[in-house]
Image (cartoon, rainbow, N blue to C red):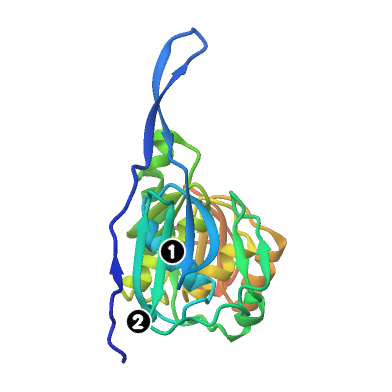
Amino acid sequence: MPEHRRPLLTNAARPATFQVEAYNERGEMVPTAIAGEHPLTLYLDKRELVTLMTLGHAPEALALGFLRNQRLVAGITDVEAVQVDWETDSVAVTTRKKAAIKKKTRKKTVTTGCGQGTVFGDLMEEIDGIRLREDVVLAEEGLFTLVEKVRRHETIYKQSGAVHGCALATLAGEILMFVEDVGRHNAVDAIAGFMWLDAIDGADKLFYTTGRLTSEMVIKCAQMRIPFLVSRSGLTKMGHEIARRVGLTMIGRASGRHYLAFTGRQRLRASAQRPTALA
């Protein structure tokens, strides 16, 4: 196994919320928290790639996760440094072997991600090579535990609204990390970046998102080798088709002890408290 080398990183997190004055229906001034939003232009080996609108709460992980999920950098050991500079609203990523990205960045797709996500290249052509573990099983109690923990989690959304959240969790429903950003695609990329940095294997994990389950979310989850994707929201037709294609267990409308399993139902195990078969 190759040595896991962490790149040189800045630590340039920005405050997630800011206080502003607002006036209620009675004309009273109410100090109110609002979510941050900052442009962050990503450079890879001095080549400008994209400008991301972000909370700026985990900019280094966001940059790494974006590069990982776009397949623009092969592995974390190829990354030499990630340097965020808010004076120029930029993040510069340098690699040990200068990445040949011209071909991959020739095609750009604007996705349905909030704030308009961007996908480079033909990632759809690569998903047929993804294999997710079939021997992992999710008990309903683990799913219900995660849904409840997310509901009770202290979040930026509860303070200010205007953000999406994503969580990485164990099969028992324990949250390993929770990231929020102005777009769900940023939140999933940041988690992908943290997983890369800490060499976390996604093959026996759950991924939760507050947003809808689109093709982009399914592809990114599959790229992280995570077999379970959960949301309190619904899904799109293309997201459903790709989940079936890669063998991912997609669970939507998850709230309380209710959920809908759209794909990969064979990985779910019914609660012992419920005698009826899985619907």
Q: Residues within 10 Å of mark 2 (few under 14, many from 20)?
A: some
Q: Quadrant of residue 141?
A: bottom left
Q: Position of residue 221 (x, y in %)?
A: 51, 69
Residue 279 visible, this angle: no
Residue 266, position in %: x, y? Answer: 55, 74
- Mark 2 highlights which residue? 77
In this view of the protein, which residue sits in the foreground, 270 or 107? Answer: 107
Amino acid bearing label 2: Thr
Residue farthest bottom in this picture: 1
Secondary structure of the residue carrying numbered label 2: helix
Look at the numbered disc 1 and give the secondary structure of its residue.
Answer: helix
Task: Say which residue label 1 marks.
Answer: 63
The single residue placed furthest to the top in the displayed view is 26
**Could you tell whether 36 is left or right of 129 in the image?**
left
Q: Please give the name of the residue rendered at 66% of the width and 73% of the height, measured from the top-left corner.
A: 106
Say whether disc 1 or disc 2 marks the residue closer to the N-terminus: 1
User: Quarter of the image holding residue 129?
Assistant: bottom right
Q: Nearer the viewer, residue 60 or 26?
A: 60
Q: Quadrant of the N terminus?
A: bottom left
Residue located 42% across and 51% down the image: 88
Q: CA distance from mark 1 to mark 2?
A: 15 Å
Residue at (48%, 8%) from the top-left corner? 27
Left of 152 or right of it: where is 239?
right
Residue toward you, 82 or 173:
82
